Amino acid sequence: MRTRWHSLRDAATLLALGAGAWTSAMAQKVNDLPGGPAVNQLNFAPPVTKIAEEQHWLHWFMMAICAVIFVIVFGVMFYSILKHRKSVGHKSQELAEPIWVELGWTIVPLLIVIGMALPATKVLVAQKDTTNADLTIKATGMQWKWGYDYIKGEGEGIGFLSTLDNSHRVMSDSGKLTPTDDYLLKVDNPMVVPVGKKVRIITTANDVIHAWMVPAFGVKQDAIPGFVRDTWFRAEKTGDFYGQCAELCGKEHAYMPIHVKVVTAEEYTAWVAEQKKAMAAKADDPSKVWALTDLVKRGESVYAANCAACHQANGKGAGPIKALDGSALVVDADKGKIINVLLNGQNNGAMPAWKQLSDTELAAVMTYTKNSWSNKTDQIIQPAEVQAARK
């Protein structure tokens, strides 16, 4: 028996030492992410908006009230149990219930609830006051990325997709993780806003319910297909701030991060000018007739940015993701089939719709898949054919 006890004790010691070493090693590899999660974080993210500060104060205010009630109620209860227990000679008896007791346990809880509700209501109303915004941005959730459209204020007309950086997706799929503070939070195109300006966020979704959440801003708003919801924030400091889709939206829910870059007014103006210049350069005439080689070259970059994460760069797919190399759908001479899949998706969203891409981008990526790897079809899909299929 003694030998068994020593063996168990030694095993527990080794397990504890191993866990401690593993934890220490991991802590050394990953650091706090400013504007995002922290190692061993217990409290809320540091607030950078007035609303988030109010939420933090409200949280601790409610916690203090609940703690006081807990101590008083359970203190009285345990005191009564110990002091008036049967083993020391106490006997149960019926007591009259005077009116002041009845009023007391009705009025006091009512006053406590009112005292908690008033500041909570003030914060809640402030959260919903989206009037007089300096900038309005529509955030569209889609499986599994965010689309941002600047619809009012400086930068009006800018629109882009924000997708998880492909290197992070590759790390996740392979299981070979490189220590990085922003794991699964790095995107290709962050949302950029100016510091000190009221930003109204309009949320909606293309497919299922998503939720736009940035803890440092104190913001979480559902994005529901067919509905428009809104929220707002005013960042008080510059920097990078991170969040994630906070509504379970499908198999790649974990790969839908949010990155908001808050910059100075001057930097924002320069960013707007740069984006508009880039958009003008990328603007395509859907009636333009492309040569096969040019469209394949354009499609290669579209595929790398949007498709390679699932179907892989070699087109072989992975697990339930179908291969495009040798796919009957891809090599089919009937172009309408593949156009319909990319515009409308299939398999209940397992293959999402890609309507958010332009006619030229869709034509290019389909032409690329039809003429890459072992798919040497020499088939070409022109942007005009995609444009016609949208109608």
Image (spheres, grey):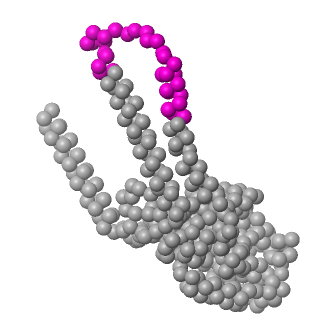
Q: Residue at x 79, y 81 (%)?
A: 383
Residue 92 in the magenta stretch? The answer is: yes
Residue 96 in the magenta stretch? The answer is: yes
Q: Nearer the viewer, residue 278 or 255?
A: 278
Q: Residue at x 57, y 77 (%)?
A: 194
Counting from the top left corner in percent of width and height, residue 328 is at 72, 69
Q: Is residue 313 above or below residue 272?
A: above
**261 sits to left or right of 307:** left
Q: Nearer the viewer, residue 121 or 325?
A: 121
Instruction: Note whether residue 68 is visible.
Output: yes
Name the magenta segment's main secondary structure.
Answer: helix
Q: Quadrant of residue 87?
A: top left
- Furthest-left residue in this view: 2
Q: Which residues are magenta?
A: 81-110
Q: Residue at x 31, y 16 (%)?
A: 84
Q: Residue at x 65, y 60 (%)?
A: 129
Counting from the top left corner in percent of width and height, residue 245 is at 58, 60
